Amino acid sequence: MESVWCIRKEAALEPGIAPDTASTGVLAGPATGLSDRFGRRISYLRVSLTEHCNLRCRYCSPERGTPRFARSDHLAPAELDQLLSVFRGLGVRHIRFTGGEPLLYPWLADRIAHARSLGIEKLSVSTNGYLLDRLAPALAEAGLKRINVSLDSLVPERFARITRGGDLNRVLRGVAIARESIAHIKLNVVLLKDENLDEVPTLVDFALAQGFDIQFIETMPLGVAGSASRSQSYASVAEAQSRIGRSHALVASASTADDGPARRFHVAGHASKIGFISPISENFCAGCNRVRLTSTGRLVYCLGQENGVDLLGPLRAGWAPEALADLIRDKVWHEKPERHTFNDAPERAAPVYMMRLGG
């Protein structure tokens, strides 16, 4: 693995690393694979299939709902398949389809099947669960084995308030149907101090009883919705962990490459993992292994910043896969930031539209 990222001219280059201009002697990045200049190997691609959603969760969507986006500006299914092939060639081994709400995307099962045909080792979908009762069997047949379902409360009135009108029973029905055909189900809970912090132990008990994994996520100041939600409702994962600890002894689980930013625990006698994602209270960027692709073909390097590169234009201009791979490799190497700036420069996250990036 490439571990030296800047050298003097006279130093020998590591195998697989291409030199930058002769005048600088600074490495331009690996000639194969996908890495950044901070020594992080990028193996995880999150793909937002659509900005549209059938819920309007407080921390994600403006109260007025999702704006309209022109379909002509979006990747066609065949174009997305081409880009997935390029990323597979760059060493991506985990693809997560997100949104908006990815189950609104008419060709989701086909994209799952295509990614499976590429040999992607890990495929997953993040969903609000509203359409699982109808679509889970077809997704499983396409090869999906992992889903993350947003479930911020088990109290119907609270759930409706957080999602601005969502029906908890419908989501629970969808999850129950999904567990019949999809092996691994994880619940995502965004911590909201004034809504669900007191419900954290109940949510854990529900996950343990069902055999689901569960993870608790701090709110992030993304866009108007996220910034308002954080200022009004922020709760740290330490608070959630403390509440769980009153009734369950949490045992740290061995970390794996697939854990990403989450710290994982388990309770003796249960297979379920309990995770905590702390973008605000405990920066986790040193281990970042991901980039994000929007439905308009924009590659974004960091959830907390708008910086990115358009891939749709070059794709429609007829660039060869090798040229697209070189562009992606170069941009990630030079432009992926070392860390987000939620705390010290929140204005960078303010323009970010959570519905376009999928978290």
Image (cartoon, helix red, strand yellow):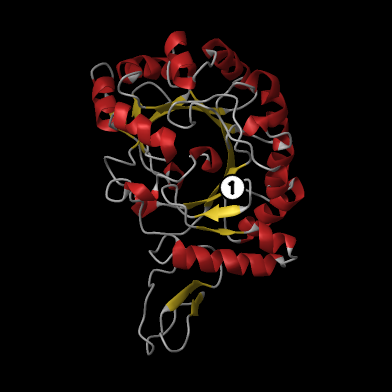
Residue 279 vs residue 116, the one in the foreground: 279
Q: Quadrant of residue 266?
A: top left
Judged left or right of residue 241, residue 130 is right
Outermost residue, front direction?
Answer: 64
Judged left or right of residue 81, residue 257 is left
Q: Is residue 199 above or below residue 264?
A: above
Residue 348 seen from this side? yes
Mark 1 neighbour class, 10 Å CA radius: few under 14, some 14 to 19, many 20 or more: many
In x, y percent, where is residue 118? Answer: 69, 51
Judged left or right of residue 16, residue 8 is left
Residue 313 vs residue 32, the one in the foreground: 313
Residue 75 seen from this side? no
Q: Is residue 324 above or below residue 278?
A: below
Q: Residue at x 75, y 65 (%)?
A: 318
- Label 1: state its secondary structure: loop
Please give the residue where the numbered disc 1 appears in the rendered image: 294
Q: Quadrant of residue 158?
A: top left
Residue 270 vs residue 149, the one in the foreground: 149
Judged left or right of residue 69, residue 345 is left
Q: Residue at x 27, y 43 (%)?
A: 282
- Give the position of the N terminus as an image quadrant: bottom left
Count the labels in the image. 1
In x, y percent, where is residue 338? Answer: 36, 59
Q: Residue at x 59, y 31 (%)?
A: 101
Q: Residue at x 66, y 30 (%)?
A: 104
Amino acid at pointer 1: Thr
In x, y percent, where is residue 184? Answer: 55, 29
Q: Is residue 46 above or below residue 229?
A: below
In x, y percent, where is residue 309? Answer: 55, 60
